[in-house]
Image: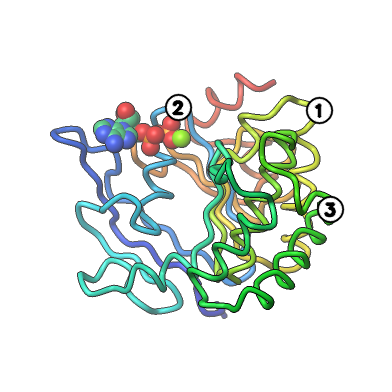
Amino acid sequence: MTSAPVLQISDLRKSFGSEEVLKGVNLTVQRGEVVVLLGSSGSGKSTFLRCINRLEEPTSGSITLNGNSVTASNANLRTLRKQIGMVFQSFNLYPHLTALKNITLALRLSLGQTRQAAEEQAKHMLAQVGLAEKAHAHPSELSGGQQQRVAIARALALEPQVMLFDEPTSALDPELVGSVLEVIRLLRQRHMTMVIVTHELGFAREAADRIIMMDKGEIVEEGPPEQLFTAPKHPRTREFLKHFT
Ligand code: ADP
Ligand code: MG
C-alpha cells in the first residue's frame, strides 16, 4: 500500500536556451518522507528544486502538490509558495530587519496575520530553532548557522506541506554545520516531508529515507541510503561517492 503522495513530479523538463538541464525527471515523495538529492555541480539539482515551486518555469512536465497542479497555467503561486517552504544556501534574510521581523513579515504578508499573532508565532518558531534570545538581532549580528536557522524558522512558520533545502549548510563554516543539521533532524522526527540537496553524506546516510542520484539532468539511480552507499550500481554514483571518501 502506498500512502498519498505529497509531491508527484512527472517527466519534468527544463531548458535554458538550447541546453536541456532537466531531461524528464520523475519523482514521487510520500508524506513524511525525507529524500536527499545528490549529484555533482551542474547536474540540475537547484533547477529541479526551483521548478517545484516555480521559481523556475518548467519547459514541460507536470507537478502536483497534494493532488493539486503546480504546473497548470492557472495555479495560484501565492498559495503554492506558502505550502512549499524553501531554504537556500545563502540564507536570504532581509538584512535591515531583525530575526523576529523577518518572520513576522512573512506571516503578515503571506497569511495576513495581525501584528500580535505574527509576533507570537514568530517567537514560537525562533524558540523551536534554539534562537529565542536572538529575536531582536539583525542578520549581521548572527552567525551563518544562526541566520540559516532563522531562514528555516521563517519557512516553517507558514506551515508548509513540504520543505525544500538547497545545500543549506554549504555556505557555513564547518563548526556551524551541525546546528543547522540538528534542526533538520528535529523536523524529520516530526515527520516533515523534505527534499534536501546536500553534500553532507554522513547526514544523508543517517537522515534520508531515500537517496536520489542525479547526473546531467537525469535521475541515474535511487534507493535506500544503505544500498546506495554500500552498493552503488551506476558508474556515476560510484564516481561521485569516491570524491567524498
Ligand atoms: P546544480 O544545482 O546541480 O549545481 P543547477 O541546477 O544550478 O545545477 O544548474 C544546472 C545547469 O543549468 C548548469 O549547466 C547551469 O549552468 C544551468 N543553469 C542554471 N540556471 C540557469 C539560468 N538561469 N540560465 C542559464 N543556465 C542556467
Ligand atoms: Mg545547486
* Residue 173 falls left or right of residue 63: right
The Cα–Cα distance between marks 1 and 2, rounded to whole angstroms, is 23 Å
- Is the CB–ligand 2 distance for label 3 below 8 Å? no
The Cα–Cα distance between marks 1 and 3, rounded to whole angstroms, is 16 Å
Return the x and y of residue 172 as percentages of the image width and height.
Answer: 68, 29
Q: How is the image coloured?
A: rainbow
Return the x and y of residue 244 as percentages of the image width and height.
Answer: 65, 22
Mark 3, secondary structure of its residue: loop
Q: Residue at x 38, y 69 (%)?
A: 78
Quadrant into which the N terminus falls: bottom right
Mark 1 or mark 3: name the one nearer the start of the chain: 3
Mark 3 or mark 2: name the one nearer the start of the chain: 2
The Cα–Cα distance between marks 3 and 2, rounded to whole angstroms, is 32 Å
Numbered circle sitting on residue 175 = 1
Numbered circle sitting on residue 238 = none
- Is the CB–ligand 1 distance for label 2 below 8 Å? yes
Amino acid type at image mark 3: Gly
* Tag 1 and tag 2, C-beta contact below 8 Å: no
Quadrant into which the C terminus falls: top right
Picture quadrant where residue 147 is located: top right
Q: Residue at x 66, y 40 (%)?
A: 139
* Tag 1 and tag 3, C-beta contact below 8 Å: no
- Is the CB–ligand 2 distance for label 1 below 8 Å? no
Q: Residues within 10 Å of mark 2 (few under 14, many from 20)?
A: few
Amino acid type at image mark 1: Glu
Mark 2 — residue? 41
Q: Residue at x 66, y 46 (%)?
A: 225
Mark 1 or mark 2: name the one nearer the start of the chain: 2
Mark 3 — residue? 130
Give the mark toward the camera: 3 or 2: 3
